[in-house]
Image (cartoon, rainbow, N blue to C red):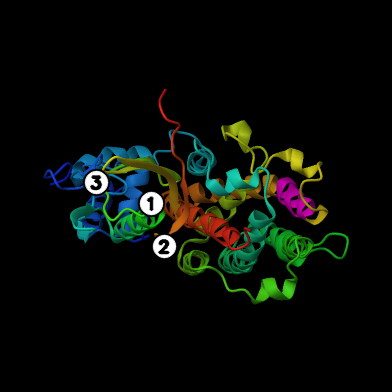
Amino acid sequence: MTKCPACLIGFARGDYPGLAQHLVDRAEESDSAHVRWLNQNLTRRKTDAESLVPALRTSFDLGGSPLTHWVKARFISKFYEDPPHPFVRALQHPSRATLLGYVMEHQHFLRQWVRSCAYIIARTDQPEVILYELDNLTTEYGGSGPDRPAHYELLLQMGESLGVDRATVLATPPLPATRRAIEQWNEMAMREHWVAVLTAMHSLELIASRTLVDDGASMHYFDPAILSSGEITPAARSFLREGYEADVGHSEQALGLASRFATALDVVEDVQSVFLRSIDLFDDYLIARLERAGQFEA
Amino acid sequence: MHGWSGPDSLKRNYDGCAICNSSWGNVWEDVDGEHLFFCCDLCAAQYRGLIDRIKQETGWGRIDSIEIAGDRRGRTCTVAAGDSHARFLFAFNSDGRLLRFQRNDRPAAV
């Protein structure tokens, strides 16, 4: 099924004329999500639906390559092409405020992460997907004993190292943009095909993948030099190092599964649109981290 | 529909949405005495907040011209009122509120 990447309403498979007309109609109503998608992905110049169809087809065309390639290319284009996302630029050599913005908002993201992955486990019938998700949840949330704390625990320790205790972190509600993103990821996890959810969530781990520069990203998530210098706290180094090392495997393995099962189950178009929606939510969520950081700036 | 209007009107470099220059959408709002086109309510809110902040920062009662460049990752605007000029860097959050706003006047031409 073809879906609208702005609102996920469904159309018949390959019905790009129907999707184009929907986008034009919703834009005519000045709906900000649809106008945004058109502006950022197709054109800023108003046109008729018929004229949009070729651009839509091109936008969704895998070009004969696996889905993984298309996902990575779109992800890099959104977050790592000139200019890279403002949060990525801020994280190159992060201030205390930037890291605390990360801590305050990401605790909410990780709690939703567990729910989203749990939906995938509940809805798939593929043992290797279940095993993958269990391993991911252990790394991200559960941990493997005191010597292998979860990413969530490392996040809280980073906050403590920067002078904000975990009780304060846990009691701080998310900013509106984070809350909206979490609500929509949750709804997505409940309603969309599990392969689409797998792609939509685990593609987000590409943000920290250190191999993304090999695929064309203009920079790393952060300057790797900060892992060996004294400019951030040891706890911050531990948190960032964990993502730096784990997210290569996490995202690559998940996208491999997604690519295989999307083709086998014939849900490639669903997966593409849900992924596109997810990265728009992620874009807003990363801005929320910066907004929160502003509250810690002197 | 858009672009430079009468002699006493605000001069703008965009002929589409006053913030992003898109021609999608159909929102018209009066801001600072000007009837302006926006692609969506979010851009209208952004523009109102930007104009208020510029006037607050400069102390000007009226802006004669505004020239915007850049994209959602970060924009600049060059504004003028009479013989006074100023340039700002700015970006918005996803609610349309200013996330960043700082004066960034170009060095005077030699």
Q: Report in which chain the residue with disc 3 lies.
A: B
Taking the magenta stretch, the answer to whether it contains residue B61 is no
Circle 3 residues within 10 Å: few <14, some 14–19, many ≥20:
some
Question: To which quarter of the image does residue B47 belong?
Answer: bottom left
The span from disc 2 to disc 1 (Cα, nearest Å) is 25 Å
Circle 1 residues within 10 Å: few <14, some 14–19, many ≥20:
some
User: What's under tag 3, amino acid-wise?
Assistant: Asp
Q: Position of residue A294 (x, y in %)?
A: 57, 59
Judge from the rendering whether residue A141 lies leftward or rightward of residue B87; answer left or right. Answer: right
The answer to whether one can see residue A218 in this image is yes
Q: Residue at x 39, y 38 (%)?
A: A61
The span from disc 1 to disc 3 (Cα, nearest Å) is 13 Å
| Residue on which the image places disc 1 | B58
User: What's under tag 2, amino acid-wise?
Assistant: Asp
User: What's under tag 1, amino acid-wise?
Assistant: Thr
Q: Are the two marked residues, 2 and 3, in contact with CB atoms closer than 8 angstroms?
A: no
The residue tagged with tag 2: helix, strand or loop? loop
